[in-house]
């Protein structure tokens, strides 16, 4: 049994690209004999009424005069040796039909013409199927955009209120209060959430930039190209502040940078904002997988950032495999994780022109670091000086 497509006002959703393609297909029969007329009908249902076959294109063109639906033309309901119908059918779903007519003077339908009309109907069916799927996806996308916009609006108000309350609380604290650091942390986290929401609000917007293909969830929202230039110091500072708080909660030693080299304060292009994503992944892994009580730290090398821990060195046979997607080390045990962080970090580093490597003895980088443990070194390309005019 063949069923009829029950779309709603599909003619209004057919793109100009599809209609032009159908027009070109029909026009290609101009020199074909014997052939007098071609019409493409699309099955549609409007306002809950029974489906009908409505004309969307015809050859030869008949100005602005539109043809009635098949059901409204009694002449078409009667068989004729000079008329043939080629269904536009996908499986058991009738999407439409191609109508072909030859002159009365022509004695028969040539086999070659019949085969070509069948091939044309098949091609139009495939294109129509894709067109209807496109229309469905566009409807879903529009609905998702509306839902995201509403959600973003609803999230911004309570976040703004939290920031206001935190700022008021900060004003009430004495300058030397030990709670000021806690309030600063709350304000920093609120700002981070606000960045997440701003990125969420950009989803589906037409002005989104083309980014490298990253098929993995991120810890931080990506930075848009129109953002101002940034520095490594500005990227790492909130991550270090969070690491200090996490180490205090886990009751483990934390060792951060005592000073910032000059290269960390040089302006870098906004695309280098992915450095924060890489380092955030490294810190998360260190706090998650390093044994309790073992130290964790971040140190700055010459054009590089190192995240280290004093835990057990990663097994030799795993040291390269852990950079593969979906691969986790034995030390991960039953802890939650996807095995994507290191693979993503290396990909992002290489996209920048840098690298990400594992060094199993942090002391090899700096004698002040533990001789046993793991160090992940993110090497970054030097900032290129601006071009000077000749």
Image: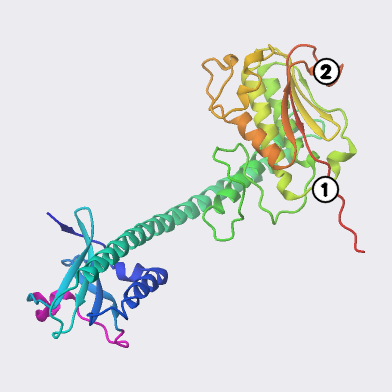
| Picture residue at 28% right of the left edge, 63% below the top | 119
Label of residue 124 in the image? none
Q: Residue furthest left?
A: 78
Q: Quadrant of residue 255?
A: top right
Q: Residue 311, relative to residue 199: is it above or below?
A: above
Q: Is residue 165 visible?
A: no
Pointer 2 residue: 364
**Residue 59's x, y, as percent?**
29, 80
Q: Are marks 2 and 1 in contact (CB under 8 Å)?
A: no
Q: In this view of the protein, which residue sits in the foreground, 49 or 329? A: 329
Q: Quadrant of residue 44?
A: bottom left
* Range of residues picked out in magenta: 61-77
| Picture residue at 79% right of the left edge, 18% below the top | 362
Per the image, label 2 sits on a secondary structure element best described as helix
| Picture residue at 69% right of the left edge, 57% below the top | 226
| Picture residue at 61% right of the left edge, 22% below the top | 321
Label of residue 267 in the image? 1
Q: Is residue 128 left or right of residue 91?
A: right
């Amino acid at each position: 049994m063949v069923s009829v497509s029950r779309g709603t006002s599909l003619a209004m959703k057919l793109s100009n690209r599809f209609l032009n393609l159908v027009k070109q297909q029909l026009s290609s029969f101009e020199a074909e004999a014997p052939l007098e007329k071609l019409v493409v009908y699309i099955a549609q249902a409007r306002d809950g009424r029974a489906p009908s076959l409505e004309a969307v294109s015809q050859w030869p063109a008949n100005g602005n005069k539109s043809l009635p639906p098949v059901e409204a033309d009694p002449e078409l309901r009667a068989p004729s040796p000079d008329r043939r119908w080629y269904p536009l059918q996908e499986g058991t779903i009738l999407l439409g039909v191609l109508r072909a007519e030859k002159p009365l003077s022509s004695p028969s339908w040539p086999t070659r013409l019949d085969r070509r009309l069948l091939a044309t109907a098949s091609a139009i069916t495939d294109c129509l199927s894709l067109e209807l799927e496109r229309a469905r996806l566009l409807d879903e996308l529009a609905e998702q955009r509306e839902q995201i916009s509403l959600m973003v609006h609803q999230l911004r108000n309570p976040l703004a209120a939290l920031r206001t309350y935190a700022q008021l609380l900060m004003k009430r604290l004495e300058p030397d209060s030990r709670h000021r650091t806690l309030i600063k942390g709350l304000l920093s986290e609120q700002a981070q959430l606000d960045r997440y929401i701003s990125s969420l609000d950009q989803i589906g917007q037409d002005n989104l930039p083309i980014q490298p293909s990253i098929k993995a969830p991120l810890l931080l929202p990506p930075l848009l190209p129109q953002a101002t230039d940034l520095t490594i110091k500005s990227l790492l500072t909130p991550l270090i502040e969070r690491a200090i708080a996490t180490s205090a909660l886990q009751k483990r030693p934390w060792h951060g940078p005592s000073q910032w080299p000059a290269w960390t304060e040089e302006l870098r292009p906004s695309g280098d904002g992915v450095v924060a994503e890489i380092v955030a992944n490294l810190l998360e892994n260190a706090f998650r997988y390093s044994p309790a009580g073992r130290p964790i730290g971040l140190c700055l090398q010459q054009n590089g950032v190192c995240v280290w821990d004093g835990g057990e060195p990663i097994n030799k046979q795993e040291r390269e495999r852990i950079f593969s997607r979906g691969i986790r080390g034995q030390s991960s045990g039953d802890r939650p994780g996807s095995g994507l962080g290191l693979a993503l970090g290396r990909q992002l580093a290489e996209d920048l022109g840098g690298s990400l490597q594992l060094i199993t003895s942090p002391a090899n980088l700096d004698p002040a670091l533990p001789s046993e443990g793991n160090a992940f070194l993110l090497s970054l390309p030097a900032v290129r000086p601006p071009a000077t005019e000749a």
